[in-house]
Image (tube, helix red, strand yellow):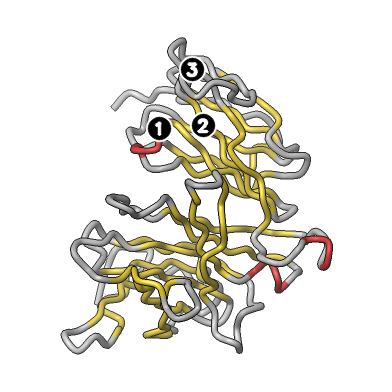
Amino acid sequence: MAERKVAELGPGAACCGWNHCGRRFAAGAVDGSVSVYDLDASPSSKWQAHEHAILNVVWLPSEYGDAIACVCSDGTLSLWEEVAVDGQVKVFELLDSLELDRWQLQAEFQNIADPVSRFGKPACTSASLAWNPRRGGSQQASFAIGFNSDSPHFNCCKIWEFEEAHQRWLPLVELGSPDDKGDAVCAVAWAPNIGRPYEIIAVATCKAIAIWYVGLNSDSDGGPSTENVAVLSGHDGEVWQLEWDMGGMTLASTGGDGMIKLWQANLDGVWHEKAVLDCTGSHN
């Protein structure tokens, strides 16, 4: 099969991500810049998204248009949106909602509910973000994000939701028990929902993988109800990545031990290890 150069990333490239159709991808760099590549090996557009290094770039689900979330090493998150008719990406503040032909910085905030001035800015080594794959009816856009930083106030995985009335992102709830709220988050994955009355979110820390059930209805405090239904351990070392299958029934995890583990819940709702895959492709 013939090989074709997709892109040429310059020095300092730190992360990249494909969009959902696999025809565009964005790359973040240590200098805080973001580049978007289309069909050419050179970027079709490049702009300065942050002052510090970009840790992760994630394309939003296609129903939100061409939009990217950028996670920075100083603990901030920025959202950039584009609907371009000329194929060029340009960064500016949207002045007319009827002229959606450029990128805009939608929001920039840190993963903390209290004033940032109380804690300062953290030094982050990684971050994980997972968008809610389901949106419909009265349900607003939302995502879960956690950091691996030197500040426990920033690390805890939180769910953020967009408030249409005031056009802002608000923290809904923290996914962490009192004993592990400050633990560094290694990976986050939001399960697809096909008819469940609750959402399932997997959060991996340095200790284990926690499975959280998040209710769609508010509890007595006004936020969604949460329940930690399982703690999955088995990786020898840090968990690197979490991914759900299309039905949201099976969770795959990878880690520094070079193993891939598949997790499922039985008919009684008890989560267990379903299979282990090694780097040679054999399985148990």
In the image, 72 versus 81, the foreground residue is: 81
Please determine whether, in this image, residue 258 is positioned above or below residue 208.
Answer: above
Q: Is residue 42 visible to us here?
A: no
Please determine whether, in this image, residue 185 is positioned above or below residue 52.
Answer: below
Q: Secondary structure at mark 1?
A: loop
Please determine whether, in this image, residue 82 is positioned above or below residue 110.
Answer: above
Residue at image mark 3: 99
Q: CA distance from mark 1 to mark 2?
A: 7 Å
Callout 1–callout 2 Cβ contact below 8 Å: yes
Residue at image mark 1: 65
In the image, 264 versus 114, the foreground residue is: 114
Q: Secondary structure at mark 3?
A: loop
Three-letter amino acid code at the position of disc 3: Glu
- Looking at the rendering, in which quadrant would you find the C terminus? bottom left
Q: Earlier in the sequence, mark 3 or mark 2?
A: 2
Q: Residue furthest left?
A: 267
Callout 3–callout 1 Cβ contact below 8 Å: no
Q: Secondary structure at mark 2?
A: strand
Residue at image mark 2: 81
